[in-house]
Amino acid sequence: MDTVLPTAWDVEGNASILNVDSDGLKVSYSGPEDYEVAPIIRANHPIPPQCEIFYFEVKILDNGKYGATEVGFGTNKMTKDCADIIPTLGQEPNSWGYHGDNGYLFCSGSGRPYGPPYSDSDTIGCYLNFRNRIVFYTKNGVNLGIACHLPEDLNSSLYPCVGLSQGGSVEINFGQKKFEYLTMNNDDVRLEKNWLNVKALDIYYGELTKLLKDQPNNPLALLCRGKVCLIMGKYEDAHTDLTRLLLIEPTNEAALRYRGEVNFILKRCDEALIDLKNLVNQRSYDKWAADT
């Protein structure tokens, strides 16, 4: 049986005060000017468990009157029970959300500071790793660090979701076009790999490991395996491969970028800053490094 992935917003089950464009990717809220009403829309399909890793991005077209856009995910029960009115995504059981108005992360009712606020023209990405239970977000292609861990006893499918305030509108990207988070694209490694297919990544990891036993200083193999480890949440292994590569090629831009990201995720901020400064020195036009 073919794996069914989220491809658009759920037109049939969306809240009655939301409007979805004909392509199913853009949604807007034109309902009453009531701050207590924050409608949520979910994707047309849940994230299939066999994916093990899933990533999507939401472009904020209009942050709405109150700037209360929320990007996250929830179970089928949450999206059914709270389709039309919910305090905010993440403040109800079985839902998680990163909030644009204050940068807080809410997980089933518990909130804490997480990342920067976001608004019009920003792109927010959400990464879910079901193997390691890791969740992180990105803003305009910059990894914001681990947000939370999925519950060990999670036994329900999760749907990508967005909550909107009055006048808000967003566009979802499930991979139909290039992501702003470059790690999930093929630009640097230039191999036709699906970075969200974990089983394929496992095989690829094994092939790279076999190659590196015979050629331990192969730059391309080190970069590829480092990137695979980063995507799979094996951060220490990624750091080891990328560090070895930078000993061979100290100015390798992809390795500097990815090791900087790994150091940031591992909260090694001083080391991350050094990598990013070195990257900027080589590529002063690198928006990702400058913004980070």
Image: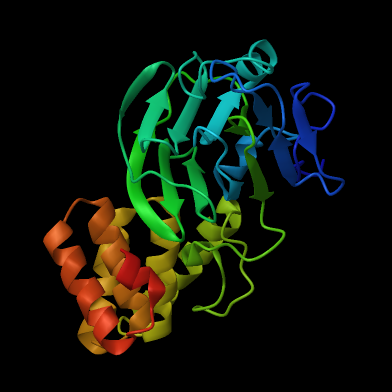
Q: Quadrant of the C terminus?
A: bottom left
Residue at 38 percent of width and 55 percent of height: 143
Residue 157 percent location from the top left of the image: 62, 26
Q: Quadrant of the N terminus?
A: top right
Rendered position, 176 above or below 96? below
Residue 126 percent location from the top left of the image: 50, 45
Choose between 237 and 47: the one closer to the eye: 47
Residue 279 percent location from the top left of the image: 28, 80
Q: Quadrant of the rendered structure where residue 216 is? A: bottom left
Residue at 75 percent of width and 47 percent of height: 25
- Farthest residue to the top: give it: 81
Residue at 60 percent of width and 58 percent of height: 200
Residue 96 percent location from the top left of the image: 48, 27
Choose between 174 and 210: the one closer to the eye: 174
Rendered position, 108 above or below 279? above
Q: Is residue 215 visible?
A: no
Choose between 211 and 1: the one closer to the eye: 1
Q: Is residue 264 visible?
A: yes
